[in-house]
């Protein structure tokens, strides 16, 4: 059976502070990378699904389990081919 | 009075929670996350720990456990539920309480005796306290920073649903020093600090935590 690769990216909403991203930014500054203005750390999920992805089902998976909509934004990337 | 203590893979403080129930005069009942059996309990405690190793988000996978469906259904009918630390994270993830718990603002695990101010003394779990009372119980977490949108926090405050606030220092950067919140009906309470670790002079900084477990016995009788 054909297998499709679906990618889900999750990041904290802009209004929720991200201390991990700030720590990474601090490290970059100490390494001399002064041009990086901000870092937001998130999660990247790769799902392999049987057949053609069901967009509604994947949207539900992304929004109800992979991300917490109270604090996180989610982006679903379906295969384009 | 049967008080269930729900154990998930990775729960740590279920034994202490059961002990606190017993010291308060209740009968602790061990519950297992994978069962669909609440064993006729009158209330449920979700204990602290690191369910599922905090994978995905703290409490996220435990919130989808089979027995949680039964807990949510009974809670919506008024059964008292207390979530402590990881249990609070589970309650937020399960949608029984608003907001979310995120990584401490200073990124360190924080473990200390913590002063709390009681803001609501009329919930199922806090009737033994008085409004404005200061209590000291341990706090120990790495992801205890309570957050929500400003609009949601304003609404929570307007509805009087903040039960505890941190005093003499905020251990994790929680918005508005919020340490614990309650459901609209005051039956579900979640907080990051650990009342079950403050029930005996020998092992705790105080016995201030015992009131949670004596409060719920009264709440169950009154219901």
Image (cartoon, helix red, strand yellow):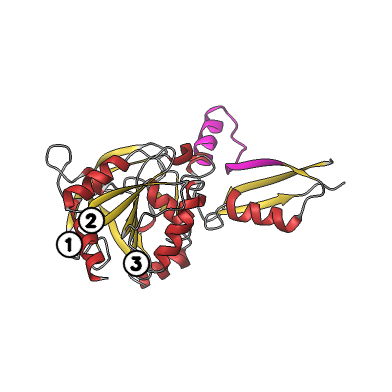
The circle on residue B128 is: 1
Specify whether residue B155 is in view: yes
Q: Quadrant of residue B215?
A: bottom left
The mark lying in front, picked from 2 and 3, is 2
Q: Which residue is mark 2?
A: B212
Q: Confirm or deny contact between disc 1 and disc 3 (CB under 8 A).
A: no
Number of labels in the image equals 3
First to last magenta residue range: A21-47
How far is the residue under mark 2 from the one under mark 1?
7 Å
| Mark with earlier residue (2, 1) | 1
How far is the residue under mark 1 from the one under mark 3?
17 Å
Q: Residue at x 47, y 67 (%)?
A: B151
Specify whether residue B120 is in view: no
How packed mark 1 is, by other alpha carbons closer than 10 Å (few <14, some 14-19, many 20 or more), is some
How packed mark 2 is, by other alpha carbons closer than 10 Å (few <14, some 14-19, many 20 or more), is many
Q: Which residue is mark 3?
A: B161
Hey, which residue is sitting farthest bottom in the picture? B158
Of residues A6 and B217, the one nearer the viewer is B217
Residue B180 vertical position relative to residue B171 in the rendered view, above or below: below
Q: Residue at x 33, y 70 (%)?
A: B160
Q: Confirm or deny contact between disc 2 and disc 1 (CB under 8 A).
A: yes
The mark lying in front, picked from 1 and 3, is 1
The circle on residue A22 is: none
Q: Is residue A31 toward the left or the right of residue B115 in the image?
A: right
Instruction: From the top left corner, tell me how far across and down residue B140 is, in percent.
Output: 32, 40
Q: Secondary structure at mark 1?
A: loop
Same chain for the residues under marks 2 and 1 in the image: yes
Same chain for the residues under marks 2 and 3 in the image: yes
Q: Quadrant of the C terminus of chain B?
A: bottom left
How far is the residue under mark 2 from the one under mark 3?
17 Å
Q: Residue at x 69, y 56 (%)?
A: A59
Hey, which residue is sitting farthest right in the picture? A81
């Amino acid at each position: 059976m054909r297998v499709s690769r679906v990618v889900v990216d999750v990041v904290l909403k802009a209004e929720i502070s991200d201390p991990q991203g700030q720590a990474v930014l601090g490290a970059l500054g100490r390494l001399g990378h002064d041009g990086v203005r901000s870092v937001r750390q998130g999660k990247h999920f790769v799902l392999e699904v049987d057949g053609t992805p069901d967009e509604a089902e994947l949207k539900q998976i992304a929004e109800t389990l992979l991300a917490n909509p109270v604090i996180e934004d989610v982006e679903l990337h379906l295969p384009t081919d | 009075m049967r008080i269930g203590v729900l154990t998930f893979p990775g729960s740590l403080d279920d034994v202490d929670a059961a002990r606190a129930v017993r010291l308060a005069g209740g009968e602790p009942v061990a519950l297992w996350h994978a069962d669909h059996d609440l064993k006729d309990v009158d209330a449920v405690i979700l204990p602290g720990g690191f369910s599922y190793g905090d994978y995905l988000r703290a409490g996220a996978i435990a919130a989808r456990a089979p027995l949680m469906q039964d807990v949510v259904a009974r809670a919506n009918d008024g059964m008292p539920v207390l979530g402590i630390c990881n249990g609070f994270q589970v309650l937020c993830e399960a949608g029984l309480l608003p907001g979310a718990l995120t990584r401490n603002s200073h990124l360190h695990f924080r473990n200390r005796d913590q002063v709390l101010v009681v803001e609501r003394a009329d919930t199922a779990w806090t009737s033994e306290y008085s409004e404005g009372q200061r209590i000291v119980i341990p706090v120990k977490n790495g992801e205890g920073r309570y957050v929500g949108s400003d609009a949601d926090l304003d609404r929570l405050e307007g509805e009087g649903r903040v039960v505890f606030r941190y005093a003499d220092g905020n251990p994790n950067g929680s918005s508005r020093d919020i340490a614990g919140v309650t459901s609209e009906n005051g039956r579900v309470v979640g907080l990051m600090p650990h009342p079950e670790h403050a029930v005996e002079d020998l092992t705790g900084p105080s016995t201030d935590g015992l009131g949670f477990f004596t409060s719920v016995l009264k709440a169950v009788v009154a219901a």
